[in-house]
Amino acid sequence: MKTWKLEIKAESLILNSVKQRRQESTSSKDLLMIILENANSGLLTPGAAKRFIVDNCKSFYFAGYDTSAIAAQWCLMLLASHPEWQIRAHAEVEEVCSGHLPNADSLVKMKLMTMVIQESLRLYPPTMFVAREVIEEVKLGDLRIPKVMLLLLVTTMKKASVGANQLPPGPPGWPVFGNMFDLGTMPHISLSSLSRKYGPVVWLRLGTVNTMVVSSAEAAMEMFKNHDLTFAGRNITEAMRACSYNQGSMALGQHGPYWRMLRRICTTELFTNNRINETERLRTKCIDNMLRWMWDESQKKGSIELVRFVSLMSFNVIGNVMLSADLVDPQSKEGDEFFKSISRTIEWGGKPNVADFFPFLQWLDPQRIKKNMTRDMGNSLDFASRFVKQRILDRQNKKKSTKVDFLDVMLDFQGNQKDGEPADISEKNINIMILELFTASTDTTTSTIEWAMTELLRNPGVMRKVQEELNQVVGQNKCIEESKIGDLHYLQAVLKETLRLHPPVPLLVPHRAMDDTKFMSYSILKDTQILVNVWAIGRDPVCWDDPLSFKPERFFRSSTDYKGHHFQFIPFGAGRRMCVGLPLAHRMLHLALGSLVHSFEWALEDGITPEKMDMRERLGITLRKADPLKVVLKLRGGEGKS
């Protein structure tokens, strides 16, 4: 009905325009005048002439308007994603047109612009099919095509258009936007659904960004074992360019001499077993403080929000490892401001940004994400800078401490100045590394502990088994020591099961293809963004029995761990870009979770039953609970232990 009404309205508009034109006295001969001349040639009846005019006007208008608009959009998008061609095209227009708009004479002189338009039409023709009716029976090769059959000439085949360079399968996309709308608010869930339809390797176009999604253990193994170096690049978001953060970052820095130097420092100086053993007492102190703060708060308010206290604990653990200082407590104002600015930095870093998908919008910063990130990241870097400057001043005044922390290691480092490695690390980049370790460690630890406690409260039988194991291995009224972690098999299984179902970064940090390459018979283009959906892999029924259930016992029957060798379980990644802080995270997670379970009896607030717990997710940089976990505490084993 709506289509019929539109047809009537369109016909009325055309006939009114024809009537008006016939009343005008003009010698100009445009397309409408040519149509009218042919209609009035005397060869058509009045009714047929009217139909001839209306049909031709509609055909020219709809075909010309739609195809021109689509072709122009694709052409502009391709120029935006290839700045070097945009510059060359702009220079040619300036040279040929000399300040005036292009006309018919100048168009034939713009050879490069013609090439750009032709290439755009080759890749993205406005119509996918051209229809032809067979008016006489004909042979096409070895096929006999009968009369009246409708033939569709395919004008665009993305897979075939590149010949042998075949792309992975994926959903069709919208013009300009591509598959952006397929992601939804929970991309890891949406991409998991797409993988069930298209397979373990899915190809998407997110605005101007080519993207490959890996969603199976087999594909992940192929990626990290055989293509680890090729896919070791990083796709940098606009937010992470604020304050030149990406240039000093290890997690986001491009693979090269400087990145290798930072990784070497972390693996040989900071996160070694000896260094981690030396700081055990500091971690124990930070966790004891957390338990005390939680108990004090629960005595005042009844119920508490767990995530706040775990965040403070994680923050102080990293502060001690890097700067030999406790930075925050519930009453600290200066430290609290640092904590909040880092929290806001994490928040901005996790927000989807349209400028990441359309680089030509970067100068506009339409969502003000980079502006806000520059402000909050700048505040965080200023805070870190005060520690660095004071440490440099102390060293100049011969006040060097006997204890060596990460800041000392960074200040003492001397590069070999070979293959592009610098002689030392600049003060600015030291500030960036400090901020990076705070953000990475705090957010992932907090997320994992909150999900682990949520699953334990949802599964009281599992909680009892963990408590019984702690009583047997550690002893009632005693504090957990890190040396006991290896004997706490059920606690280890609980954390593994938590990380399987709730990986902190469900799509890992995006990788980037540094060169064109072949991957599982597909051709992957240079600069393609690669997302590894570890959330989907952890719930894949091919790898896991009863994958949606929380069953720590499944790890008793296997040697599967999260250290990057078992590709069905890679919450911290694998290969060159695997989380460098995993050795410290392993100890922090077990010590913190074990201490929480061993110290308190846990209950949900307001009589909420385990079956009615809110398990919705909220995705930023990490995967958090949408509704923070609130609990009521009671001491286990007497008040003396607190």
Image: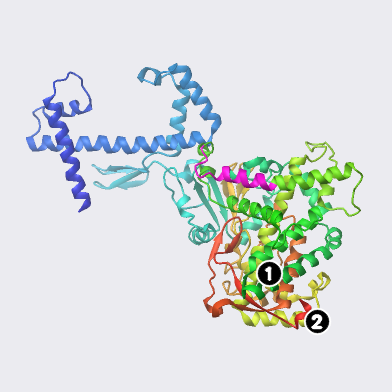
Q: Nearer the viewer, residue 297 or 150?
A: 297
- Magenta: main secondary structure: helix
Q: Which residues are magenta?
A: 364-380
Query: Relative to 573, does residue 257 appear above or below in the rendering?
Result: above
Residue position marked by numbered label 2 in the rendering: 475
Query: Which three-letter amino acid code belongs to the residue tagged 2?
Result: Gly
- For label 1, the SS is helix
Residue 443 location, x and y as percent? 66, 59
Colouring:
rainbow
Residue 583 at x, y percent in the picture: 77, 61
Above-or-below relation of 539 to 404: below
Q: Is residue 494 above or below residue 369?
A: below
Mark 1 and mark 2: Cα distance apart in space:
23 Å
Q: Amino acid at mark 1?
A: Lys
Going from N to C along the chain, the mark reached first, 1 or 2, is: 2
Q: Residues within 10 Å of mark 2 (few under 14, many from 20)?
A: few
Percent across and percent down for residue 362 are 54, 38
Q: Quadrant of the C terminus?
A: bottom right
Residue 236 in sight in this render: no
Q: How many discs appear? A: 2
Assess whether residue 422 is covered by the magenta stretch: no
Q: Nearer the viewer, residue 278 or 173?
A: 278
Residue plotted at (72% across, 53% down): 437
Horizontal and vertical percent position of residue 478: 81, 78
Label 1 sits on residue:
496
Q: In terms of secondary structure, where does tag 2 sit?
A: loop
Q: Quadrant of residue 305?
A: bottom right
